[in-house]
Image (spheres, helix red, strand yellow):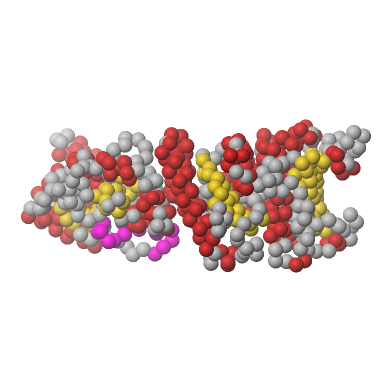
């Protein structure tokens, strides 16, 4: 290469500098991942060239010999990875290698746990894999040229990872990118053919492009001088998904999953299918064992299943292929019958893609049902990682709603611990005359288990499902019934548990007196049969927002009209008996406010005036102690 422009020195942005420090100092035990990431980047560049060549006449014929070449010189401590992919121009080099805040680096840094195995997996998820080169390299040089630009528009980028990089425009006859690493002395044990082949087989054996290892012959100083006899094809570049299931072993599936996702943990399950006939496609799907940290936030991120057309990578599967509630699935889809010039706009009108989507849904749910039938640790891992996401399917997929609902699991009053209960389990245990599947939504399992709404159900021995995921309020809004049984909240409307008792006049009068004392703080106050131990609870009308849903919507920044809580009282409670006998209206009003605050606290709500509540409780305690005859309480209060 010859220099045709001056060298420019630039500084990395702050986040890249932080990231480089991490790579160099904190991930030593995961050093091998650097080669996985650089090979994946080379493969992506080759995929991109093949895709752009479909529509860009200037790239026709340039998408040939898209192998990835690796060369090393153990004595000099140099390793190079070269591809003939799409390459980069000067602006793209600066954008991609100098400033990467757009790729989520801050979230990456905030997500690190100190567990090096898990942290290494995050590197691939956040697209910062190039910087893993600095785990082993004291200097990295990138020479690149975009495939559709002239030889004099080549770019060379050099950095030692200490805060700055040098960039210059150079003459570069070859398209694509070559990355040269000057390996640190303590990592030069990696510069052997055996070590490099071992790493490639482990992480990158199933990349869709040939990986060729250039080995120096005896007496030669550099691998670039080697003859063809010293060039060895290392990986199995035949796409695994195109092979028959009978030809592929379990270890190969696991290795392919690792090379596809960068996840060092084995998948929980997988499915491999070839669909023949008038519309042909291959499908290889995996269920991971753990979830990305931001899966619940990034609902539009469905990069886990990749769409190929005759082994040409087209795009990460869009919603037309993988629904949002299955965004945790990983794998590949390859069709011979989609047009090679397909665009994202054309996805909407393709009958074949609709068929592929239906197959993805069916096969994914088949895998999940199989995990549920087998139970044990794999099923527990699935529920912990993806149970909440799967619930979105009840809301979004009407056709599969009942099938998905059958896979959901919830805590229950019949299970002392956190063991999950399915709707089918619940129905099997229902009482003979029971019409509803009863549930309670709450902020946490502890709040749910201690809710006063459960008191009458415990009395009658009726099981209640305890729903504590944030999505559960939306879930029950869309799942009105399951297998002919309606779902009903224990905290809404009137209860019908077979008891036909009507409140007496005294109970109605007490409710009216409490309503008058509380005024605009409440909606309705009614006596009821929900409670056996608590004085009162908050009850929502059948068609209004629950207090929990209103709180969540406010936390999400939505405007929600202020709801006045409806109060159901237990006239048989001792506290309400004392209130009914009291002629002191001021004292009565204080006690009425106290039981309202208690009912709100039992729902997990925050009080508007906690200090006043504490004062009321203290006053009641003082009064109770004083009435006990000690006389000391009144003095202490004065």
Instruction: Name the residue located 69 percent from the left edge and 38 percent from the top edge.
Output: 201
Q: Name the foreground residue: 52 vs 437.
A: 52
Q: Name the foreground residue: 339 vs 549.
A: 339
- Residue 124 as seen in the image, left or right of residue 559: right
Q: Residue furthest left?
A: 505
In the displayed structure, 354 sits above or below 112; it is: below
**Is residue 552 highlighted in magenta?**
yes
Instruction: Name the residue located 74 percent from the left edge and 36 percent from the top edge.
Output: 197
Q: Name the foreground residue: 280 vs 236.
A: 280
In the displayed structure, 420 sits above or below 163; it is: above
Q: Residue furthest right?
A: 219
Residue 613 position within the rendered picture, expressed as x and y whole percent measured from the top left:
28, 49
**Is residue 180 highlighted in magenta?**
no
In the displayed structure, 546 sits above or below 382; it is: below
- Residue 32 as seen in the image, left or right of residue 119: right
Q: Is residue 75 visible?
A: yes
The C terminus: image quadrant: top left
Please give the count of numbered marks on the rendered protein.
0
Instruction: Name the residue located 84 percent from the left edge and 39 percent from the top edge.
Output: 230
Residue 132, quarter of the rendered image:
top right
Q: Name the foreground residue: 332 vs 196.
A: 332
Q: Is residue 101 visible?
A: no
Residue 211 position within the rendered picture, expressed as x and y whole percent measured from the top left:
75, 44
Instruction: Name the residue located 37 percent from the left edge and 40 percent from the top edge.
Output: 420
The N terminus: image quadrant: bottom right
Residue 524 position within the rendered picture, expressed as x and y whole percent measured from the top left:
20, 59
- Residue 181 as seen in the image, left or right of residue 538: right
- The magenta-colored residue range is 540-559
Residue 432 position within the rendered picture, expressed as x and y whole percent measured from the top left:
19, 43
């Amino acid at each position: 290469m010859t220099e045709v422009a001056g060298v420019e020195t630039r500084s990395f942005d702050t986040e890249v500098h932080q990231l480089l420090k991490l790579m160099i100092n904190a991930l030593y035990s995961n050093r091998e991942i650097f080669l996985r990431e650089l090979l994946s980047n080379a493969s992506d560049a080759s995929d991109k060239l093949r895709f752009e060549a479909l529509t860009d006449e200037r790239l026709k014929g340039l998408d040939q010999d898209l192998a990835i070449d690796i060369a090393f010189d153990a004595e000099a401590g140099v390793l190079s990875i070269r591809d003939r992919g799409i390459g980069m121009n000067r602006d793209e080099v600066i954008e991609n290698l100098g400033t990467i805040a757009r790729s989520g680096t801050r979230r990456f840094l905030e997500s690190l746990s100190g567990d090096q195995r898990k942290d290494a997996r995050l590197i691939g998820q956040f697209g910062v894999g190039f910087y893993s080169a600095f785990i082993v390299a004291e200097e990295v040089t990138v020479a690149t040229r975009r495939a559709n630009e002239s030889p004099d528009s080549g770019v060379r980028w050099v950095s030692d990872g200490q805060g700055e990089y040098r960039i210059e425009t150079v003459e570069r006859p070859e398209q694509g990118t070559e990355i040269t690493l000057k390996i640190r002395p303590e990592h030069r044990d990696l510069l052997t053919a055996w070590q490099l082949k071992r790493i490639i087989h482990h992480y990158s054996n199933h990349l869709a492009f040939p990986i060729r290892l250039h080995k120096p012959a005896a007496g030669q100083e550099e691998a670039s001088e080697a003859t063809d006899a010293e060039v060895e094809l290392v990986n199995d570049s035949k796409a695994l998904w195109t092979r028959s299931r009978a030809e592929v072993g379990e270890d190969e599936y696991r290795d392919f999953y690792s090379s596809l996702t960068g996840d060092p943990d084995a998948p929980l399950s997988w499915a491999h299918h070839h669909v023949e006939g008038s519309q042909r496609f291959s499908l290889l799907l995996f269920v991971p064992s753990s979830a990305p940290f931001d899966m619940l936030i990034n609902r539009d991120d469905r990069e886990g299943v990749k769409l190929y057309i005759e082994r040409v990578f087209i795009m990460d599967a869009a919603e037309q292929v993988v629904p949002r509630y299955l965004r945790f699935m990983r794998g590949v889809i390859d069709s011979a019958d989609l047009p090679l010039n397909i665009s994202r706009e054309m996805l909407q009108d393709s009958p074949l893609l609709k068929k592929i989507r239906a197959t993805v849904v069916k096969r994914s749910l088949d895998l999940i049902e199989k995990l549920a039938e087998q139970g044990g640790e794999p099923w527990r891992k699935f529920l912990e990682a993806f149970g909440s996401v799967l619930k979105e399917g009840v809301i979004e997929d009407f056709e599969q709603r009942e099938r998905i609902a059958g896979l959901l699991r919830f805590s229950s009053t019949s299970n002392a611990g956190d063991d999950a209960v399915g709707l089918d389990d619940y129905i099997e245990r229902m009482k003979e005359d029971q019409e509803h599947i009863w549930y309670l939504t709450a902020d946490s399992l502890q709040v749910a288990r201690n809710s006063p709404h459960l008191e009458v159900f415990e009395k009658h021995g009726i099981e209640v499902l305890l729903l504590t995921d944030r999505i559960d309020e939306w879930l029950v809004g869309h799942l009105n019934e399951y297998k002919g049984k309606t779902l009903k909240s224990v905290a809404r409307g009137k209860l019908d548990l077979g008891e036909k008792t009507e409140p007496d006049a005294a109970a109605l009068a007490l409710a009216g007196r409490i309503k008058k004392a509380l005024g605009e703080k409440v909606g309705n106050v009614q006596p009821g049969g929900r409670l056996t131990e608590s004085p009162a609870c908050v009850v929502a009308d059948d068609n209004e927002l629950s207090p929990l849903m209103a709180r969540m919507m406010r936390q999400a920044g939505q405007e929600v009209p202020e709801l006045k809580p409806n109060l159901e009282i237990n006239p048989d409670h001792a506290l309400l008996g004392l209130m009914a006998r009291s002629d002191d209206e001021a004292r009565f009003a204080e006690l009425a406010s106290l039981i309202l605050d208690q009912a709100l606290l039992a729902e997990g709500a925050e009080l508007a005036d906690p200090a006043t509540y504490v004062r009321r409780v203290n006053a009641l305690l003082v009064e109770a102690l004083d009435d006990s005859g000690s006389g000391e309480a009144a003095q202490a209060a004065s």
